[in-house]
Amino acid sequence: LPFGRLEGALTLAGGVVRLRDLTVDAGAAATVSGSAALDLARLTLQADTTIRVTPDKDDQVAGAAPQVAVAFAGPVDQPRRSVDVAPFAAYLTIRAFEREVRRVEALQEEIIERDRFARELRRLREERQRREREEAERLERERVEFEIEGRRFREAAEARRVQARREQQEAARRQAAERTRTTPTPTFEGLIRDALDSRGSLTPAPAAPLRLQPLPPPVQVPGAPPVIDAR
């Protein structure tokens, strides 16, 4: 393990070399700390070290650290090594739990978001149906009002036509009555004059002599002047 700095307190007393507060800075990768005792008379070693890995930001958990404890005990040439991975296992367990919690929270947020989206769609659909219903009701009201207005207009037009027809008939009756009052009563002389006018003038034409037709026998009209026979 490459490191950049090593710190510790080294003492020698009674034939025992002791190393306390050992710290090995390996940068961002890991940190090693521990202590050791070397008995020079018996050539035995007693050492306890802890290797702590620096996790990424997403892998950091509260209450646990990814670390492993390594202990050495026994003769210097063949020390017994023991490894305690309980803290590292605890870290992995907590990290897995927190990942699961985050996954469940993300899933729950997704479910909540889907529910919110579904509610929004339902609200928009209901709003659209309400607007369509209101528009249909408005169009129906306008249609009914248009029909009523059209019926009123037709009734008014029919009433005006009836009134105009009555006025024409009344005017025709007044004109007929006026002509009846102003037309003189025909007389016998007038009838004779009209008959002669309808047959043409009594003046003979240059080409042929005028032949008068015999007049009808005189008609005695009480109170009328005597008719002179032109024959």
Image (spheres, helix red, strand yellow):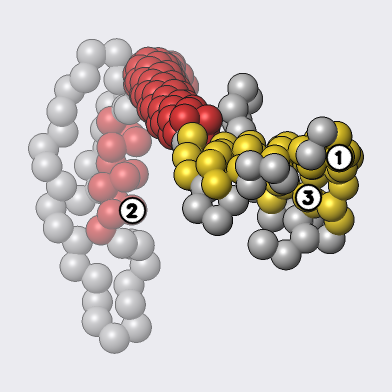
Q: Residue at x 29, y 13 (%)?
A: 223
Quadrant assignment for the N terminus: bottom right
Q: Is residue 188 above or below residue 23?
A: above
Alpha carbon of mark 3 to alpha carbon of mark 1: how far? Answer: 21 Å
Horizontal side of 227 relative to 89 (left or right) equals: left
- Residue furthest to the bottom in view is 207
Evaluate whether residue 124 shows in this view.
no
Pointer 3: what residue?
A: 24
Nearer the observer, disc 2 or disc 1? 1
Q: Earlier in the sequence, mark 3 or mark 2?
A: 3
Q: Nearer the viewer, residue 15 or 104?
A: 15
Q: Tag 2: residue type?
A: Asp
Q: Which mark is residue 197?
A: 2
Q: Secondary structure at mark 2?
A: helix
**SS at badge 1:** strand
Q: Quadrant of residue 199?
A: bottom left
Q: Residue at x 23, y 13 (%)?
A: 222
* Quarter occupied by residue 66: top right
Residue 28 is at least partly visible in this image: yes
Please tell me in which quadrant of the rendered image residue 193 appears.
top left
Tell which residue pokes out farthest to the front in this image: 41
Contact flag, marks 3 and 1 (Cβ < 8 Å): no
Name the residue beneath numbered marker 1: 12
Q: Which mark is residue 165?
A: none
Front residue of 14/114: it is 14
Q: SS at mark 3?
A: strand
Q: Amino acid at mark 3?
A: Val
Which one is in front, 158 or 75? 75
Residue 88 vertical position relative to residue 75 in the rendered view, above or below: above
N-terminal label among 3 and 1? 1
Residue 128 % position (x, y): 42, 27
Instruction: Work out whether mark 2 precedes mark 1 in sequence or the reverse, and give the earlier one.
Output: 1
